Amino acid sequence: MTRIITNTGRIGVATTVIACLLFAGCGSDNDDGAATEPDVSAPAATDASADTAVPAETAEIMAADYAFSNVPASIAPGTKLSLTNSSAVELHEMVVFRIPDTETRSIEELVALPETEQDAIFGDGPPAVVQLAMPGSDEPIPALGDGTLTEPGRYAMVCFIPQGVDPQEYMDAAESSGDGPPAVDGGPPHVALGMYAEFTVEG
């Protein structure tokens, strides 16, 4: 069951992040290791989204404390997302959900919804993509999928990592946490601090 916020209106950690716990078994999913795909992402913008679509290759998403940047407003089907973490201390993740076609509210409105309403929107299945990146790393750790998005539609991008968590402690705990989020002390999830964005895969 997905959780973006709790029923008190505060944003909380997603409980479907079986996605976030699969990286121990999926760390080798990226088997195109021979060559690195070229960075053809849109130029960095001051807000979460750039103004143009990028070709169907790789969009390099930047994670900082606490925001995503270089998120194109739209991408072509088949584009692969790749997470780079520019933070010196914080672990970040990129959890990508497809927003149902009937949903017209913005990501800002969606993250502010009560828990039960979010379940109705996102609770039908796992995220489309989950990647983590250690502080200062441009090598994402695939937790779910290889980063490629093929289905047209609107997508939400969020980070559920607790603020201030020790990156290695979190990764170690996730390896043994079973089917729930790792029990690691930390502050509010990064999405509560504004780490979310939305974009479109063009049809």
Image: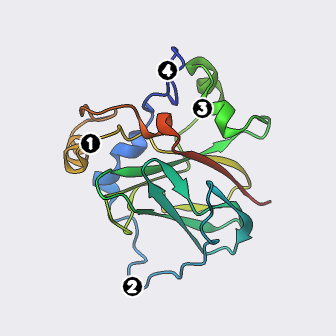
Q: Which residue occupies the extreme front position in the image?
A: 46
Give the image location of residue 188, x and y in percent: 39, 31
User: Up-down: is 88 above or below 181?
Assistant: below
Alpha carbon of mark 2 to alpha carbon of mark 4: how far? 43 Å
Q: For the view shown, which residue lies furthest in the top direction?
A: 8
Residue 58 horizontal/vertical position (percent): 57, 72
Asked whether, in this view, residue 41 is left or right of residue 34, the answer is right
Residue assigned mark 1? 174
- The amino acid pointed to by label 3 is Val
Q: Position of residue 150 (x, y in %)?
A: 66, 61
| Amino acid, disc 4 | Thr
Residue at the (68%, 31%) spot, across then down: 109
Q: Secondary structure at mark 4?
A: loop
- Element type at mark 3: helix
Going from N to C along the chain, the mark reached first, 1 or 3, is 3
Any part of residue 153 in sight: yes
The residue that mark 2 highlights is: 34
**What is the spatial separation of the Cα atoms under label 1 and label 3, in whole angstroms?**
24 Å
For the residue pair 113 and 117, the one nearer the viewer reads as 113
Q: Seen in the image, is 171 located left or right of residue 30?
A: left
**Labels 3 & 4 near each other (Cβ < 8 A):** no
Q: Is 187 situated above or below 92?
A: above
Q: Which residue in the protein does label 4 denote?
A: 6
- Mark 3 surroundings: few (<14), some (14-19) or many (≥20) residues within 10 A: many
Nearest to N terminus: mark 2 or mark 3? 2
- Distance from the alpha carbon under mark 3 to that under mark 4: 10 Å
Distance between the alpha carbons at the discs numbered 4 and 1? 21 Å
- Picture layout, residue 11 above or below residue 35: above
